[in-house]
Amino acid sequence: MKQTTLIIFSCLFISSAALADVVRTKDGAQLTGTITLIDKGIIHLDTTYAGTLLIQQDQVESFESDSPRVLRLASGTVMAGPIASSGGKTIRIQSEDGVLETTIAKVTAAWAPDAEDPEIVRNRRAWRYDASFDLTGKSGNTDKYQLGTSVVAELASPNDTLRFFAEYEQAEAEDVKTEDRTAGGASYESFYSEIFGWYVRTEVESDPIDNVKLRSTSAGGMSYRLIDKDYQTLVARTGLGYRYTAFENDSDDESSATLDVGLAHAYRFNDHFKMKNDLTFVPAIDDFSNYRFVHDSGVEIPIGSSENWKIRVGIKNEYESETTAAEKLDTSYYTRMIYSWE
């Protein structure tokens, strides 16, 4: 009886091993599991002994799978069927239309027949929302603590982003209101190549404490992707714009054509921690000494294991070279609780 049981378990083990996908690396390792995805040069291999392994495709000699897989090659050809290694770097795909031999280097993507093409998933536009609650310390025109809220909605794909935002800040010191700022705006950015794109943006703001009844800024121009990696992006923007400012006191309204220069940088340290830096420089075309400079840098930290909650700790500087307020520079130190969802 024991011998019969042992034989049965041995057959089951051998059968499961035979059905497993096999990945052979260039250094001679042979890994077994289930290939769930090949995308952007990474092979995803689900295993029972080490979870999901992410294997660099350029380090793989060959792979094979008894289960059908859909493959897309560098030429654009898409085939579905079992995959076998035919020795060396060559793999053989057995489809309904015949047999195709190719190399691992020519495979740009692979996925299960019941899954979606990863390129379609990656390029699909999707809405993402952020709602935040701020606790801020500020020095400059005012020294205080303040509370604020903001909402951001983005419809994004890898090559374009439509963004809306609204924010409100209010603060009191010894029963005296020291902050009463409302702002909102929209922007759209689209890239028509790996490097070049274009953008338009518009913002409105009201801040009676800083003597601003209404400030509106609209601009548009060219965008340049200087860095575009999974863990780091850097986008530069240059364009033309128009700025209008109406003041709370009897000062004359101001309006001028402007240049619009900006930098947006993001760096992901790992799957969780992220740093963001944004710079905007808007000088008047007829008088470069009349400009507005805004800088915002912060680090986003997840809260526990939640994918929705995070904290952003940062600093924001706003400098007006010509202003009717008491100080030209406002510096904000903030801790922002953010809830994100899709």
Image (spheres, rainbow, N blue to C red):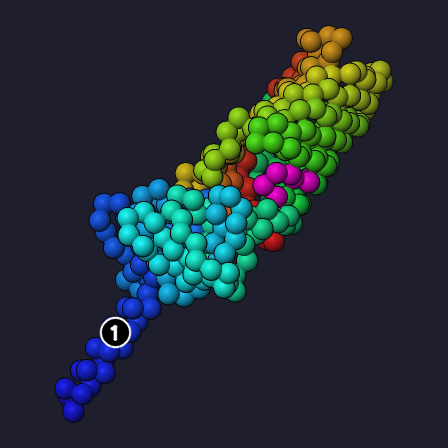
Q: Secondary structure at mark 1?
A: helix
Look at the image and say whether residue 22 sits in the magenta stretch.
no
Q: Which residues are magenta?
A: 157-163
Q: Quadrant of residue 218?
A: top right
Where is residue 68? Give x, y as percent.
44, 64
At x 14%, y 86%, the residue is 3
128, above or below 9, in the image: above
At x 33%, y 65%, the residue is 20
Where is residue 261? Give x, y as percent.
64, 20
Q: Residue furthest bottom?
A: 1
Amino acid at circle 1 = Phe
Task: Inspect this view and state whether residue 153 appears.
Answer: yes
35, above or below 198, in the image: below
Task: Between residue 281 and residue 65, name the one nearer to us.
Answer: 65
**Mark 1 residue crowding within 10 angstroms, few (<14) / some (14–19) / many (20+):** few
48 left or right of 155? left
Where is residue 202? Give x, y as percent.
74, 31
Task: Between residue 134 and residue 75, name the one nearer to us.
Answer: 75
Where is residue 116? Give x, y as percent.
55, 58
Q: Quadrant of the N terminus?
A: bottom left
At x 84%, y 15%, the residue is 252
168, above or below 8, in the image: above
Name the chief secondary structure element in magenta.
Answer: strand
Label 1 sits on residue: 13
278, above or below 311, in the image: above
